[in-house]
Image: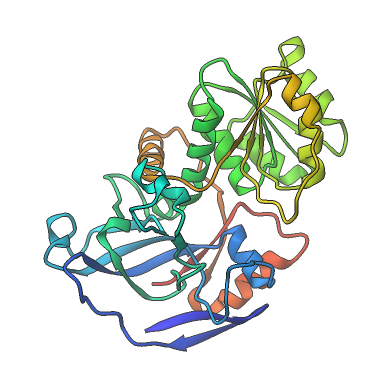
Amino acid sequence: MKAAVLTAPYEITVEKRGMPQIQGPQDVLFKILQTGICGSDMLAFRGGHKTVQYPRVLGHECVGEVVAVGYEAEKKFLPGDLVTVQPQLICGTCYPCRHGRINVCTHKKFMGINEDGFFTEYYKCNQFNIVKLPQGVTHDMGMLVEPFAVGANAAERAGAEQGKNIVIVGAGTIGNCTAQIAVARGANVLITDIKDGRLQYAQDCGIKNCCNTNRVSLAQAIDGAFGSAGADVLIDCCGIPEMLQNMVCCAQNASRIVLVGTYGRDILMNMTHLQRGEIDIISVMQYVRRHYLQVFDLMQRGKLHLEGFIGARFPLSGLQQAFDYLHEPNTDVMKVAIMVQ
């Protein structure tokens, strides 16, 4: 089979590798139909991911078709089933795992980061990680459930619900996913960015309040969207330290700040303002299974706008070109899909 391997920063080689085989009773072997490129893949491509070692097959957002299963897995999966993958590899025994928070397993590894991922023609893993696509969920939807699951966890931990005023800073892929799910949960959403193309797409997705913070300040944007009521929650989906510091200054007493973006360094914050105002700081890391199921439900009910979300498609043999395309400064798409089969 073919696998596209990141051999060094900015260098991808398509190799021939042996076909994975069913070995254990819970194994599921599937052919990969398409895989999305994530921001963490781009970070690894540029050589900036601290835990990716080379060579590595990247990719953790996929949809596939079951080819073979172990004798225990056949109780849940059959050849021909369309599936996606929850790519966390967990211990199952640490404190977070025992409390149902496997997304922050103390010993967690991640497919496509610590282990080889889905830019390959076939893949085998334990049935625990396999999620069958519900009726009516397309290949594109199956590939996109993973980033939308991050948004589902973010919206849940933000307490996004009917009537809540939510500010989302960063209208990239995860910001858009989070905003769409917050709207679906009934929240009033303001999304900000410095790229007009992202904000226009957010409007196309039904997000009414979109603001370019190169033109107005974040405080002015919040006032324009919500007036004297202000924001109940500010969600950081950009991971820019200076913007987080600005969000802290804009947070009103008794509100909440949710951290979704990742930061490359430690950040100084106004702790006096946070403490005296009882402003909650809540972090988000990936998702658990219920977030996949929530996203599938929203997809089936037509609550998510997916038209145009995938902005470009490349074959597996063109993975180098796909990463080069995303690395160009003027490229501005929500998602690039690699069509493996």
Q: Quadrant of residue 47?
A: bottom right
80 lies above or below 215: below
Q: Position of residue 57 (x, y in %)?
A: 49, 75
Q: Quadrant of residue 203?
A: top right
Q: Position of residue 116 (x, y in %)?
A: 45, 73
Quarter holding the C terminus is bottom left
Quarter holding the N terminus is bottom left
Between 206 and 176, the one lying in front of the other is: 176
The residue at the point 64 percent across, 65 percent down is: 42
Q: Position of residue 195 (x, y in %)?
A: 77, 45
Between 23 and 66, the one lying in front of the other is: 23
Q: Is residue 74 left or right of residue 166?
A: left
- Please name the colour scheme applied to the rendered image: rainbow
The residue at the point 60 percent across, 41 percent down is: 176
The residue at the point 55 percent across, 49 percent down is: 309
The residue at the point 35 percent across, 36 percent down is: 297
Q: Quadrant of residue 45?
A: bottom right
So how many labels did they put on this image? 0
Q: Is residue 283 left or right of residue 268?
A: left
Between 82 and 307, the one lying in front of the other is: 82
161 lies above or below 294: above
Q: Position of residue 82 (x, y in %)?
A: 28, 58
25 lies above or below 280: below
316 lies above or below 191: below
